[in-house]
Amino acid sequence: MKLSKNNKSFEPCPEFSGLAVVVDVTPLKKVETAYGPKETFKIVFETPLLREDGTPYSVWSRGFTPSLHEKAAFAQFLRKWFGRALTAAEEAEFDTEALLGKTAEITVVHEEGKTGETYANIALIRPDKTGKAMKPSGKFKRLKDREQTNGAPDAEYRRTEQSEDAGETDDWRRTKVHIGKHKGLDLGDLDTVAVKALIEHWLPEVKLKSKLLADDRRLIAALEAAQKALTADGEVDPDNIPY
């Protein structure tokens, strides 16, 4: 009887703000969303934080549909990451494989899933302006290169599949507001007008800060999840707009 170490719990990346480097862009996979089935992929960033065995922690992005439309989630993610929109020439020749080895400044926060698991999510991404060199450790194996067991990825990737959109559930409603007149209330206790006001006014301003409090990071992640939820409740899904 073969036994596998892959049965152990997967430890998520600790909360973190700093430089990270892309080590994988996953193959397209069909998932169920609020808008029906879609093919999505994820970007994996390796951090400088080390586990006890000396391997770096990695963190996975949310799932993206492969669209470069200006309102699509992936295009908006790239804009925050690059600090600008893609040029027409870049769009015409864009290949996600070119992202391998590219660095970014990211903020990782922890979110609790529906059944109590802790997931690491990217709450903020910015261009790398540190001037510091960071290369992949070489210890991370891409999904397409990993050994399969009964047709399923190993434990590390199974964990990320189970956490698909974990940071985009109703858990955002339980995040405490720590600023303004609604301080101390759960975000879910605010009316839609108040939530949209935080998204439109506080969110852009706080992202300009060079240093963020842990409460800032949590509220940023919650507001971004709330923004997606409000879109799902009646606005057009930007990922359905044809490029």
Image: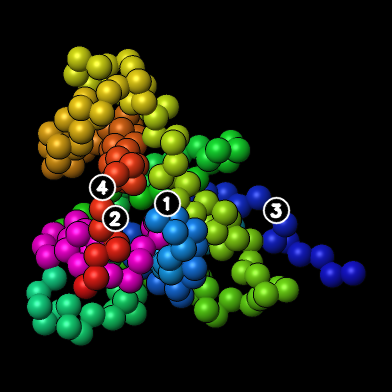
As shown in the figure, which amino acid type bears the numbered disc 3?
Lys
Q: Callout 2: 10 Å neighbours few (<14), some, many (20+)?
A: some
Is 35 situated above or below 193? Answer: below
Q: Quadrant of residue 96?
A: bottom left
Q: Between label 2 and label 3, give the one nearer the viewer.
A: 2
CB atoms at circles 4 and 2 under 8 Å apart? yes
SS under mark 1: loop
Q: CA distance from mark 1 to mark 4?
A: 12 Å
Mark 2 / mark 1, whichever is N-terminal:
1
Mark drawn on residue 8: 3
Q: How far, Cα to Cα, is label 3 from label 4?
A: 41 Å
Is residue 45 visible to us here?
no
Separation (CA) of disc 3 from disc 1:
31 Å
Q: Along the polypeptide, which appears first: circle 3 or circle 4?
A: 3
User: Label for residue 34?
Assistant: 1
Q: Magenta residues?
A: 61-85
Across and down, in percent, residue 150 comes to 73, 73
Between 154 and 33, the one nearer to me in the picture: 33
Which residue occupies 45% across, 34% down? 171
Q: Which residue is mark 4?
A: 235
Tell me which numbered mark, 2 or 3, is placed earlier along the sequence: 3
From the viewer's perspective, tell me whether residue 145 is left or right of residue 69: right
Q: Magenta stretch containing residue 48, yes or no?
A: no
Residue 237's label in the rendered image is 2
User: Disc 1 residue type?
Assistant: Ala
